Image (spheres, rainbow, N blue to C red):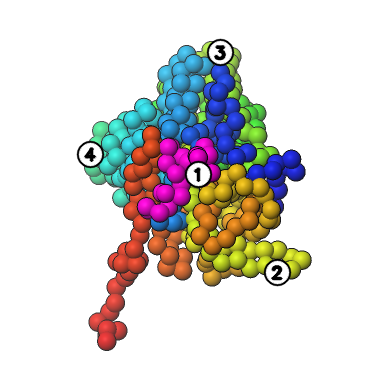
Amino acid sequence: MVSTHPAEVQNAGTQYLPQRRNTSTNISPNQELLPLTAKVNSNDNLEIGGCDVTTLVEQFGSPLYILDEATLRTACQQYRDSFKKYYPGESQVLYASKAWSCLAVCAMIASEGLGIDVVSGGELYTALTAGMSPEKIYLHGNNKSRAELTLAIESGVTIVVDNWYELHTLVEILKAMSVPSTRIMLRLTPGIECHTHEYIRTGHLDSKFGFDPNDLGEVFEFVSKQPTLNCVGVHAHIGSQIFERQPHQDLGAVMVQWLRDAAKYGLNLTELNVGGGLGIKYVESDDPPSIEEWVKAICEVVQAACAAENLPLPKLLSEPGRSLIAPACVTAYTIGSSKTIPEIRTYVAIDGGMSDNPRPITYQSVYRAVVANKLSAPITETVTIAGKHCESGDILIKNAQLPKTEAGDILVVMGTGAYNYSMASNYNRLPRPAAVVVADGEANLILQRETYQDLIRQDCLPERLKS
C-alpha cells in the first residue's frame, strides 16, 4: 500500500486536479483522481462543486463525504450516450446501487434515465422510495429471502435468479400468491478470469454466484416448463475494478451463445446483461479505459457475435457501480495527533478511519490524499495516515507524501464514493459521517450525521439490568 509521487511533482495537491479540462476530448470521470469540478481557489483551498471544502467541514463537521453532482451526472450521461452511440439496438444502464445506496443518489440516477440494480430488500425499498420505476429495477443476490422475493414480485421488478433453490422457491411463492408470472433473468458463471482482487472476482467458476454453465441445458429446460417464470434474458458479472477490455469482450461473445442455446428449449430471450466492473483511477499508475472505450468494446463484440449466430440484437444492459459513483466523492477528515518513530515512520491521525472506509483493511486498497487547506504547498513529509480506531490495522494510506501537516488541517481522501458509506460501520461506537451533495456553489445534506443517541436506539435493556 505504498504511496509515492513522481520526483518532479513539487506541490502537494494541484497535480491531482483534472488535467483535460479545456480540450475537445470528453473527460471520463473514472480516469481522474479528483471530481471534475475540483479546483484550487484564491485561498489555496480545495474547492469542489463551487464549495470550499474547509468551509464544508466547518458547516457540516468531519469526517464528511462530499459528493460532486456534476461528476456523477457526467458519468451517467457518458454511459447512457455511449450505448446509444455504439449499439443500434435497445440498451439500459443500471446503477449497481450496492456501491452507495441512499435516497438522493438513487434519485439523481433515476433523473438521468438509468435503472438500478439492487441486491437486497433494503436496497430495493430505497430505490422504490427514491422514485425509480420498478420496470428499471433488477434484484440480484445469491440467497434472497422469501420476504425479498415476495417484495420483488409485488413491486413488479425483474428478479435475477442465481441458483436452483431460488428457482424452486420462486415457483412455490408465485403459486401461493396466484400471480400469473414474474419477470426473471438467469445469472450464469461464465468462467472468465480477470486480474483483480480475489474477493471481487465473480466470473470464475469457483464463485458463490450464478448457475454453473454445465447446468445450462437443464436450467433452460426447467424454466421453459414454468408458465409463472417469464424468463427474459441472461446475466453475468466477472468482477470489479477491471482495467482489461478483453475479459468483457470474451463475456459478450459467450453470453450470445447462451441466447442461441436457450432457443433450443423454446425460450425467446431478449435481454443480455453483461454486468459491470470497469475500474477507476485510485492512484497515478492506474490506467483504466474510459467509459466510452469500455462501452464501445462491449457493443462491438455483442453485435459481431449476434451476426455470427444470426440472432437479432438483444436489449443490452450493463451495471456500473464504482465507475459511476466513486470518482464523484471525496472524504474530508480533520487531522489530530501525530507520532514520529525515528528511522521508521511518522503517523498522522485523522478523526475517522476503518469505520467510514473499511476498504484498505479489507481489500488492501490504495488511495491518494491532499491537504485541502494547503493545496499548493510543497511536499515535505512522508507519513502514514492512521485512523482513530482501536485497531493497529486501521491505516488508510501508507507513505503518503504531503506538505507539513498540523492538527486542524483538513485531509481529503479521493475516490471514496463506492463502498465507503455503504460498508461503513459503528465500530468502536463511532457515529457514521454525514454526506453532502455539492453543485454550483451550494451544498445540501443527503445523509445526516449519526448521533450517540442513534447508536443506542436499537439497544434493549432487560428490566433486571436496570438500576
Seen in the picture, residue 37 relative to 252 is either above or below; the reply is below
**Label 2: which secondary element:** strand
Residue visible at 50% across and 40% down? 42
Residue appearing at x 34%, y 63% in the figure: 451
Label 3 crowd (10 A; few <14 / some 14-19 / many >=20)? few
Mark 2 and mark 1 lie on one chain; the one further toward the N terminus is: 1
Mark seen at residue 43? 1
Q: Earlier in the sequence, mark 4 or mark 1?
A: 1
Pair 2/1: label in front: 1
Question: 184 or 377: nearer the eye?
Answer: 377
The numbered dot on residue 307 is 3
Q: Residue at x 57, y 36 (%)?
A: 17
Amino acid carrying mark 4 in the image: Ser
x, y percent for residue 346: 67, 63
Residue at image mark 4: 178
Between 383 and 195, the one lying in front of the other is 383
Q: Is residue 447 left or right of residue 420?
A: left
